[in-house]
Image (spheres, grey):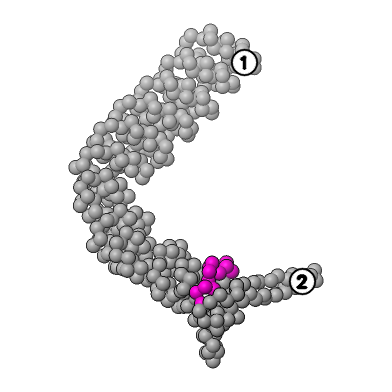
Amino acid sequence: MGLFKPGWMNNDVDKALHAVEKLTNQSGLAKAAKNAPDRRVRMKAVEKLTDQAVLINIVNNDKDSEVRITALKKITDEKALAGIAINNEFRNVCVEAVSKLTTESILAEVAKKDRLGFVSKRAVEKVLTQASLVDVAKNANYIGTKKEAVQKLTDQAKLLDLANNESDSAIRLTAAEKLNNETSAQRVFSEIAKNQNNPSSIRREAAEKLTDQGLLLELANTEIDNSVRLAAANKLENETIAQKVYSEIAKNERDYHIRQKAVEKLTDQALLLDLVKNDHNTRKESIRNLSPESLKNIMLFCCDADTSDLLKKIGNDVMKKEIAEALSNELPKGFSELFTDIDEYKKISEVFKYREEKKEKTSVTCGTTERWTEKYGFNFPPFEG
């Protein structure tokens, strides 16, 4: 800057602004726009700039987003605006750059190249031609952008082509959902749901779209992925088969959440009782779905008087406690009314009555003892049979 500071470097902002107002040459304005310490002074200089290269430089390098946007508003080159939209580090600058774009091919390029989603989403909103939307649907970097493009498509031939031939299963699914030909849509849903190379989440979603009972039955009976089987079983009209599938999933699936969803769908009391007796992993969830009558039966089962089989006795004791825990120590309303035999009722009430287990835990370091009580069982009302 030499021995003398230019006026726009003055610490007094008003004087610096006045100095910028007097500038008329683009070279001097460019220096002020790039180097003035106060953002207000830089913005004032930018407002007087017309040099596109300098404006682009400021949009890409100024430390203040408002200065960048002030410069952006003066840029007219759409290719430059596209580069800014894709690469600028300030989100609001990117969005503002997209808002200035009007050329279809450039908007499509922005939609395809952006990796963050929020820019490409706005670009797709401005894309109108079916050909450009297909281009974005096939080639965009961001999956959300691809889906947005497909959602805007109305050309059935182009949608069918995407549904049949696109490599990305999520795009195939989105395209199939927009098909007017339900037979074609069902075929695509089935193909996606059956293909074990597709992500489980996409396969489940495809199964949920199926209505063809033959295809659903095939999935429910033969599919390896139990989350997909579950989705198919949920759509079956044959409730007997659906209940059988839920039971198999509950017994064999390792994932707790999938097992739990399967048990929640079970209403067949025989299948539920089988799970309660033989499957520790789903016992509590199964107990909660039992009818009062089935609950009575399983409680009588636990009261087996034969204590010669130690393993059976231990298993029944565990089951008693888990029944109490599953029902949060609350018997169903009117439970006692199910009994006509006072001896049965006494047997159950004796076995399942409230018990207390006192435990002690001693701390060696401080010499204190911690006590707590664990309760399980039920408070039984008087016999009303």
Who's the residue at 48% across and 32% down the image?
Answer: 90
Residue 334 colored in magenta in the image: yes
Q: Is residue 151 above or below residue 272?
A: above
Q: Quadrant of the N terminus?
A: top right
Extreme residue toward the bottom, this view: 308
Magenta segment main secondary structure: loop
Q: CA distance from mark 2 to mark 1?
A: 72 Å
Pinpoint residue 177: horizontal percent, then vertical percent: 28, 47
Would you name the residue on which mark 2 appears?
A: 369
Name the one closer to the observer, 110 or 153. Answer: 153
Crowd class of label 2 (few under 14; some 14 to 19; many from 20; radius 10 Å): few
Asked if residue 253 can be seen in this view, the reply is no
In terms of sequence position, does the residue under pointer 2 or pointer 1 come before the other? 1
Q: Nearer the viewer, mark 2 or mark 1?
A: 2
Extreme residue toward the right, this view: 367
Which mark, residue 13? 1
Who's the residue at 70% across and 70% down the image?
Answer: 372
> Does residue 152 appear to the left or right of 46 in the view shown?
left
> What range is drawn magenta here?
325-339
Pinpoint residue 3: horizontal percent, then vertical percent: 62, 14
| Kind of residue at badge 1 | Val
Q: Is residue 284 above or below residue 130?
A: below
